[in-house]
Image (cartoon, rainbow, N blue to C red):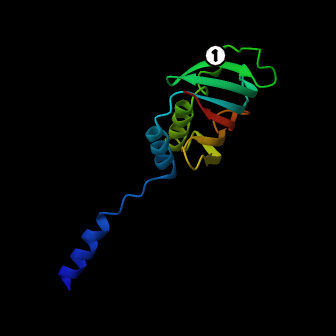
Amino acid sequence: MLSVLATQSSCNIFQHYTESNFDRNRRLWRESKITNYRMTVDLQKTGHAAPMGKFIITVRGGVAESIKSANDPEYVLRKDRFEKYDTIDKIFEIIEREEKEKWYSDIKEMEYDSKLGYPKKLRLDNFSAMDDELFFQVLQFEVLE
């Protein structure tokens, strides 16, 4: 009987690894090897000098090439205002940081694209600052050559 208990307890030590929703979707995104794309996003970020509105972001080689107002595509915006939110990889970095530092903020809403794995919607609330929230939603996504 003692050997049976020892066997059962040793089996419990090695739990099966379950891939998290975040890990599975980031893996899907990486496996797609998409580095050239255009996305129309709704970005609402409270705080000082934060971008707010709908924007068309063109990414080439994994780097934001241009950011335009969706309401006036002729108006090109300064990329430095968007540097934290201008690529899918940077949105994954935000999610990863928030999941590791749960004391810092709370992910209120999270949705991924079922085919490519990119974050389609993210809403988070920063606990350490008043009125410092982020809402990011991909409204349209197009792979470029």
Residue name at image x 19 percent, y 82 percent: 2
Q: Viewed as shown, does residue 117 lie left or right of 8?
A: right
Q: Would you place residue 14 above or below residue 102 in this image?
A: below
Q: Viewed as shown, does residue 117 lie left or right of 3?
A: right
Q: Position of residue 89 (x, y in %)?
A: 52, 32
Farthest residue to the front: give it. Answer: 145
Quadrant (top left, top right, bottom left, bottom right) of the N terminus: bottom left
Q: Viewed as shown, does residue 3 lie left or right of 85?
A: left
How many residues crowd mark 1 within 10 Å: few (<14), some (14–19), many (20+)? some
> For residue 45, which quarter of the picture?
top right
Residue denoted by label 1: 79
Q: Position of residue 47 (x, y in %)?
A: 72, 26
> For residue 50, which quarter of the picture?
top right
Q: Would you place residue 145 above or below residue 109 in this image?
A: above
Residue name at image x 64 percent, y 22 percent: 82
Quadrant (top left, top right, bottom left, bottom right) of the C terminus: top right
> For residue 17, which quarter of the picture?
bottom left
